[in-house]
Amino acid sequence: PEASDVTHTGAMADDAQRSPRTPKHKTVLMCRPEHFTVTSAINVWMDPSKPTSTARALEQWHALHDAYASLGYDVELIDPIAGLDDMVYAANGGFTLDGKAYGAKFTYAERQPEGPAYMAWFEANGFEVHRPRHVNEGEGDMLLSRGAILAGHGFRTSLESHDELRGIFDREVVSLRLVDPRFYHLDTAMAILDDEQIAYLPAAFDEAGRRELERRYPDAILVDEADASVLGLNSFGDGCTMVIAERATGFARQLAERGYETIGLDLSELLLGGGGIKCCTLELRR
Ligand code: ARG
């Protein structure tokens, strides 16, 4: 029995060694939460009667910025604009791929001026900008996986914009309907782990969406309600290390079992606006 124990342990160690994960270099765009506050309630997380602290938001955001820097990411910055409370959630500023940027067209008036601001940044920073005809909230609802674009709709991004996406990037676009108002952007209900794998909360999608995800990703990490409810899925990584909400302890365990490293962060202040790590991160693919 002792010998077989040893063999077993040895086999597991071999497995871990056989597939060391290699980080992919990431370039991201972020926006300092200099003007962060909650003055309206455009999602169910927001309550303007609750106090917010811009200083705390800045501190937490800096921790995220430092985590990315420590992982060797290139972090580019867009200047925050006074009066745009939500501009820190850079993921919504657009979607970039192959040197092209598809601009955002926000659902709510509060955020609409962000669309042109992010497009101006893309233009000034070498992207071919495609102005949107249809309502869409950028990478908040568009995630790149296995060369295809997984695209959410139901709360913010319109289904019509998915056709626009297809036309601009000439990639497969997989439309997924979101059904739970707490998970109103795709990046609150799903995380991209690497080129191959994803994690998601099945209950955030309609039945057709769940079926599609099961078919495409039979080995995905299924995250539970408790972890999703602290925006655990709103995470970002380089295929090797995932930066996640520290309160998502179950998800952290699931990731560790699959051989990913994790960095846990507290973004509780930014959660008051209904956003987390991924929301503050827009990937730049030039
Ligand atoms: N308050 C912002 C909104 O409701 C939060 C955006 C969160 N961003 C995200 N990518 N999920 O629009």
Image (cartoon, rainbow, N blue to C red):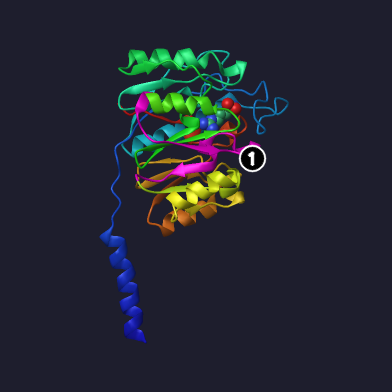
Note whether ligand 1 is within 8 Å of mark 1: no
Residue sitting at the far bottom: 1
Q: Is residue 54 above or below residue 197?
A: above
Q: Which residues are magenta?
A: 168-195
Q: What residue is shown at x 66% (from left), y 30% (from top)? A: 46
Q: Is residue 192 magenta?
A: yes
Ligand 1 shows up in the quarter that is top right
> In which image quadrant can residue 119 be found?
top left
Query: Can you say which quadrant of the picture contains the C terminus?
Result: top left
From the top left corner, tell me how far across and down residue 40 is, in percent.
Answer: 67, 22
Q: Is residue 23 magenta?
A: no
| Residue 267 visible somewhere in the drawing | yes
Q: What residue would you read off at disc 1?
A: 180
Residue sitting at the far right: 49
Q: Residues within 10 Å of mark 1 (few under 14, many from 20)?
A: some
Q: Nearer the viewer, residue 248 or 136?
A: 136
Q: Is residue 183 above or below residue 257?
A: above
Say what amino acid the circle numbered 1 marks. Answer: Asp
Q: What residue is shown at x 58% (from left), y 38% (from top)? A: 178
Q: Nearer the viewer, residue 53 or 270?
A: 270
Query: Can you say which quadrant of the picture contains the N terminus?
Result: bottom left
**What secondary structure is found at the residue carrying circle 1?**
loop
Left or right side of 19 for 45:
right
Q: What residue is shown at x 31% (from left), y 62% (from top)? A: 16
Residue sitting at the far left: 18
| Residue 56 visible somewhere in the drawing | no
Q: What residue is shown at x 40% (from left), y 46% (from top)? A: 193
